[in-house]
Amino acid sequence: MLNIVLFGPPGAGKGTQAEKLIEKYNLVHLSTGDILRAELKAETELGKEAKKFMEKGELVPDSVVIGMIVAKIDANPNAKGFIFDGFPRTTAQAEALDEVLNKKGTPISIMLALFVDDDELIKRLLLRGKDSGRADDQDQSIIENRIKVYNKDTAPVIDFYDDKNKYKAIDGVGSIDEIFFRLCEAIDSV
Ligand code: B4P
């Protein structure tokens, strides 16, 4: 089983690359951002709770996100593997994911971290904000807060996987195909 954590700051290209990787490796794509946006749209209780955090560029509480992802893993018992996109975003989330996957005997194979400088991230997200309808992409101060939250709460997750020799840094600047090639090279060497 191939279980990949696709990691990086907002706008690093996680969602974009995950779409290509699931096709090539026949994996199930679990994006916490996508799942939360679907809950928001359906106006569920979970969605209403998450909205308060997402619209400010803050992280949704671990208890909400962890329960959500565990339910999605359990809902796909025949998966050949998963791409975790935007999850884990805190060390507590990484620990919870490890526990669940270890119980199933299918641990994370590799954590691929995309690196992109802040100016490029802001440029990409503002561009997406023009036609995506995502409120969190339309306001530069919200984008900057997301990057700040990434550096403070999410970047430490790298150490969690580095300690397990599962961390691989990937240059996230270049064409979408160039970056895809770099990711595939790293996966194929696992
Ligand atoms: P996400 O949906 O994960 O938001 P994101 O990080 O901005 O998306 P992504 O990283 O996939 O975008 P991509 O780079 O592909 O989360 C949104 C919010 O949900 C969070 O702020 C948080 O509140 C909440 N949340 C989600 N998960 C959570 C968790 N685990 N815990 C707590 N809260 C959580 O794309 C960006 C743009 O760049 C696109 O327009 C794309 O076309 C462009 N792009 C991609 N690759 C490019 C390239 N090579 N060159 C130029 N442009 C490129």
Image (spheres, helix red, strand yellow):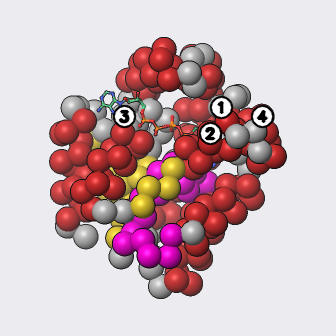
Residue 51 x/y as whole percent: 73, 35
Label 4 crowd (10 A; few <14 / some 14-19 / many >=20): few
Question: Tag 2 or tag 3, which sits nearer the N-term?
Answer: 2
Q: In which quadrant is the C terminus drawn?
A: bottom left
Asked if the stretch drawn in magenta spans residue 186, the answer is: no
What's the residue type where badge 4 is placed?
Answer: Lys
Foreground: disc 1 or disc 4: 4
- The image's mark for residue 17 is none
Q: Which residues fall within the magenta stretch?
A: 76-91
Callout 1–callout 3 Cβ contact below 8 Å: no
What's the residue type where badge 2 is placed?
Answer: Arg
| Residue 126 can be seen in this image | no
Seen as rendered, the residue at the extreme front is: 42
Q: Cβ(mark 1) to ligand 1 < 8 Å?
A: yes
Q: Which residue is at the front of the view, 100 or 121?
A: 100
Label 2 crowd (10 A; few <14 / some 14-19 / many >=20): some
- Label 4 sits on residue: 52
Residue at x 29%, y 54% (from the top left corner): 23
- Label 2 sits on residue: 37
Foreground: disc 1 or disc 3: 1
- The image's mark for residue 116 is 3
Residue 170 x/y as whole percent: 29, 47
Classify residue 131 as left or right of residue 74. Answer: left
Question: CA gap, disc 1 to disc 4?
Answer: 9 Å
- Label 1 sits on residue: 57
